[in-house]
Image: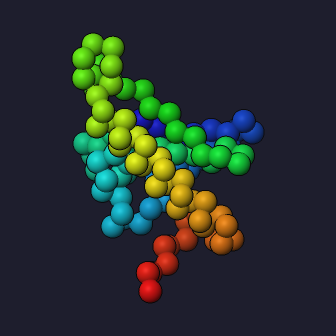
Amino acid sequence: MNDTAVSDTGSRKVAIQDLYPDHYAHCYGCGRLNEHGLHIKSYWDGEEALATFDPAPYHTAIPGFVYGGLIASLIDCHSTGTAAAATFQAEGRPPEALPRSAT
């Protein structure tokens, strides 16, 4: 999996999940620090976030079908990353800002 994407203008985009602080970066689905994980990446594209994932042959449940756990991880990691980034954007905070502590 690539850690960055290239925009239409040629600039490099950083995945939302790659901006997570280290203590949040161990997720099997999207954690950049999990060497055995899926490394799901979401990127802002205009007004929405996009993620693509090409399953390997060993991600099948039965021939021709991806197993449900992978699909659940895709939904979970993309949705969580997008929600966090959208919240930061709505608050006018840069994506690389640390999360605020719950009070």
Front residue of 5/54: it is: 54
Q: Nearer the viewer, residue 52 or 61?
A: 61
Number of numbered discs: 0
Q: Quick one: quadrant of the C terminus?
A: bottom left
The residue sitting at 61% across, 60% down in the picture is 86
- Check the image and report above or below for 59 versus 4: above
Drawn side of residue 40 relative to residue 52, left or right: left
Q: Residue furthest top?
A: 63
Residue 18 in sight from this viewpoint: no
Which residue corresponds to the image point at 75% horizontal and 39% vertical from the top-left? 9
Q: Residue at x 35, y 41 (%)?
A: 72
Which percent across, then down, holds residue 32?
37, 51
Is the N terminus in the top left, top right, bottom left or bottom right quadrant?
top left
Res. 19 visible in picture: yes
Residue 11: where, in percent of width, then height? 68, 44
Quadrant of residue 39 within the rendered picture: top left
x then y, percent, for residue 92: 69, 71
Q: Where's residue 58, x and y in %?
A: 25, 23
Task: Report the side of 99 relative to 9 (left or right).
Answer: left
The residue positioned 60% from the left and 46% from the top of the image is 49
Q: Is residue 73 left or right of residue 3?
A: left
The residue sitting at the bottom extreme is: 103
Up-down relation of residue 58 to residue 86 (above or below)? above
Colour scheme employed for the rendering of this structure: rainbow
